[in-house]
Amino acid sequence: MKMFEVPEVFPEDWPKEKRMGVIRDIGRKAKEEFDERYPSIIKWFEEYEALYILSFCAIYFLSYPEGTDPEAYKGELDFYYHYLEIMQAFALMQERAISVKPLAEKAEALRTEMKELGDLMGRRQYDVPDNVTEEELLEHILLWRMRDQTAAIRNWAYPKQMFMLTKGLARGVRDKFRSLYGIDPEKLVDLLIGIVHSAGEKLNTHLAKVRGFMKIRNYEKVIKEYNETWQDMVPISNEEAKELYKNSGESCRNLKIMLLAHSDLRLSDIYTFSLDDLMRLLSSQESEVALRCILDNWSFEFGDLKDHKTEYFVLDNPVLRKPFIKIAKDTYFSSILGILPHMTLGLLEGLVAVDKSLKKKYDHHKGDYLEEIAADLIKRNFPNGTLFRQSQWNDPKTGLQYENDLTVIIDSFAIVTECKAGAVSALAKRGEPFRFKRTLEDLILEPADQANRFIEYLSSYPGMHILKTRDGKENRIDTTLVNYYIPLTLTIEDLGFISSNIKEAINGGLIKREVRSLVPSMSVSALECVFELLDNEVEKIHYLLRRREFEHHVDYVGDELDLLGFYLENGFNIGDMEYTGLHISLANKSKELDPYFTAKEVGKTVEKPSLQMTKWWKDIINRVCLKRPKRWTELGFILLNSTKEDQTTFEYEMFCLRSRVKTGRVEHKHNWVTFLSGPEKRRYLIAGFPYKRLARTVRNSVMQDIFASEQRNQTRGAVCIGVNVETNEYPYSVIAAVGETCFIDSNLQTSFGNVK
């Protein structure tokens, strides 16, 4: 997913009003055309049988061979899942038509129509109100992005993550849920997993049957194979076979296409489940009556949406809350099983919301569960750090008491984390301005303020802090050696492009804060992916800190995993471009990561994506993390502020100098090579010092001279890598670092008290 430059769309001399006029005109025309064409989707379900056409779209338009992703190499799809969701909603507006008519040549027309409607759906957002201010325009764009995400983005976590997250939340209310519904909610989640797997198996079985007759070249053998494959149908007689062959122009290929169209009438079986099927998938002694009740709760019947406003199918599609269609007593169908992981949490919470006491218990558990999994994630990924939970402290300025969820101290860094488990309301997802602002306040701004507030307290009073915890114990947090604080907020649900770039919300006036008070916000599932792909504690610290700086300096569109994909390519080391007002689209950069995570979920091995650097550089950092010399985190941090290209050049120069030092072909008594990594505003000095026959005191003195050089005065920090050419210790013999108070971007505030 290489980056490329997009030329300016409009002539440079066009004023803003003229540019906005063109954009607004595109939006208005798209809106008019969409409003005119959108209702016509219903005609497909008047002419064709609903289950057939929905199944046809699910298989032919949305199923791909394992290990392939057309969106990754085409940049877009001709048919997206939200098109199918909309179609399923339209199908439920009327009674089910009885028809065996195949789509045949009309299939491509259907795909084209839905793609064109999807394009219009997106372009109509360009209909910007007249005479908007710059801030109002930014707000419009932000709300538009939220609506686009609600309409089109599915599976905000990988399927296994979604199922495990939902099961963990269900576990906390198991007893009360079971007493209300008569079924174990964890088993219910297992059932949803089973439905997805079962549909996949049925699809593969069907395709194998189709391949069986499609690969044969003799028409008589084709018919014989077809009869034997589907023995539940009335077999095609020899006379009928001859007639079919004649009608196909005596072409075996055409005959097979006719039989394929006939077999397509069975496609709905793949997505249809009887209550008995589901009880077998449940694989436990659960109540059949209880399961029927829940399935009915998750289902519509044909005609149920006849009075529903079709416009709501775009941003508030009811089939996402009730994905199944009850087609007969104890028989259920759904064409959107491919996004069932995306819906699992919502399906559970829909059942929970029915009972107030159950909802109260669930909400309480949801907060505790987020904090629990976040603590476990941080503890596992910072094994050399000290984790503190639920620290209660009093603000000396106001006298108010606050509580910090999680703080981990690793060497001279402290990561201060606040967790917020609230849900994103349906109105917020639809981009309703007040609800959207309220959601940003609750899920992002409030915990960000809490993190900044605690950082100010800790940094203002360095030393030992003895703080009570919620359960009456003590946290003894020693900040004597802490030089740098990294704030972080975590949520359960993901706000996609919005939460990964809070600066847009600030610039758009939706959040009343200074940009410099930015705190990275991400879902706990996204953080799990970040930590999975970064190899050591230093890389994780570097990502979280640079992630904050990058958001401050660069205007981008992308979610957290898009950012992660970009980081793995270059460590956010993009030189002076970082400070030039760069506008960059990172959308779909996460496609580079999908093969690893999706393969891992099914037990297959794919090479893990990792931060790009030379082997020597990686080995240096890994050894630093293993040996943990003084200020080891700062040392590793500085080394990560360089590109692989710079590392390669430096390594070559170091190799050449080592050879000269070893043979005595050098100009000076002590020799070293240096390079300045990063742009002027974020520059570090990295030196390589090969030596031989030096006493430790002399060696250290030379390294101090390197740190005292004029080059060093122009940087935030410096690292010197010393190699004894006689012993050839690998990857280094000695390493040291120095830093300044400006080690971290001085424009980024780590003290809440300075917020205006």
Image: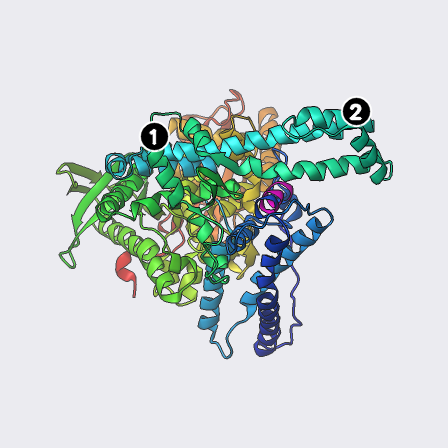
Start-end of magenta stretch? 53-60
Work out which quarter of the rendered image holds the C terminus and state it.
Answer: bottom left
Residue pictured at 50% horizontal, 63% vertical:
311
Image coordinates for residue 377, horizontal then vertical, percent: 35, 35
Residue pictured at 58% horizontal, 46% vertical:
54
Residue pictured at 62% horizontal, 71% vertical:
29
Name the residue nearer the viewer: 419 or 743.
419
- Name the main secondary structure of what is drawn in magenta: helix
- Which secondary structure, mark 1? loop
**Amino acid of disc 2:** Lys
Name the residue nearer the viewer: 188 or 12.
188
- Closer mark to the observer between disc 2 and disc 1: 2
Sequence-first disc among 2 and 1: 2
Residue 342 belongs to the span the image colors magenta: no
**Amino acid of disc 1:** Pro
Q: CA distance from mark 2 to mark 1?
A: 65 Å
Around disc 2, counting alpha carbons within 10 Å, would you say few (fewer than 14), some (14 to 19), or many (20 or more)? few
Disc 2 designates what residue?
A: 221
Work out which quarter of the rendered image holds the N terminus and state it.
Answer: top right
In this image, 234 relative to 622: left or right?
right
Name the residue nearer the viewer: 182 or 665.
182
Disc 1 designates what residue?
A: 383
Q: How many marks?
A: 2
